[in-house]
Amino acid sequence: MRLISSKIWIKTSNQVLFIVLIVLAAGFASNYFRSDKIPFIEDWSAKSNLVTPSGENLEISLAEASNLFKKGKAFFIDARSLAEYDAGHIKGAISLPYKEVDWKFVEAMTGISEESAVITYCDGETCELSMELAVFLRNAGYKNATVLSNGWPVWKQNGLPVETGE
């Protein structure tokens, strides 16, 4: 009796393995022939979030951003909430919380030409608000919108000019 049940177990296991292999082969073949293939390996790093679907890198380095700041040749846009902005922000930055961009966009961007260098930032490496805001601004015509990755923390850590309040 025991010998029979182990043979059945082995036979069932082999059949399940065979079915799984067929399903995997069908899935790989299907993906191979798709025009919009699903990648097997994906870059999930914070830096990869700074690349648009068209492949354009929106990141600006701290050195470039601080150089533009010192020359007064860029507008800094804080994508964080107004409470976070009031607690501290890059000196002269404009508050445009991404979650409120639909109704605060026109007011916040008044006086900023579409050709101007615009640098968005938020709080921390994994914060995506600045990327989403930069993409929004680019779609609105601000083709020089970039993202300062890890913006607020890295700006403070390097002793660059900050202020509090509005």
Image (spheres, rainbow, N blue to C red):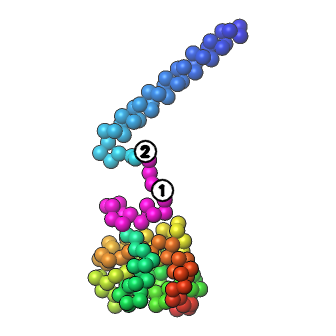
For image coordinates 62% across by 17% down, the residue present is 9
Q: Against 117, is 150 above or below?
A: above
Q: Which mark is residue 44?
A: 1
Taken as a whole, is the magenta stretch helix, strand or loop? loop
Asked if residue 42 is among those painted magenta in the image, a careful observer would answer yes
**Amino acid under label 1?**
Trp
Is residue 97 among the parts visible in the rendering? no
Nearest the viewer among 166 and 43 is: 43
Residue 141 image point, x, y percent: 29, 77
CA gap, disc 1 and disc 2: 12 Å
Q: Is residue 75 left or right of residue 166?
A: left
Image mark count:
2
The stretch in magenta equals 40-57
Q: Which mark is residue 142?
A: none
**Amino acid under label 2?**
Phe
Quadrant in the picture for residue 120: bottom left
Q: Secondary structure at mark 2?
A: loop
Is residue 33 among the parts visible in the rendering? yes
Residue 121 image point, x, y percent: 47, 77
Nearest the viewer among 120 and 27 is: 120
Quadrant in the picture for residue 62: bottom left
Q: Provide the residue designation for mark 2.
A: 40
Residue 149 image point, x, y percent: 47, 72
**Tags 1 and 2 touching, CB below 8 Å:** no
For image coordinates 67% across by 13% down, the residue present is 5
How crowded pointer 2 is (Cα within 10 Å; few <14, some 14-19, many 20+) is rated as: few
Q: Secondary structure at mark 1?
A: loop
Asked if residue 27 is among those painted magenta in the image, a careful observer would answer no
For image coordinates 28% across by 82% down, the residue present is 115
For image coordinates 44% across by 51% down, the residue present is 42
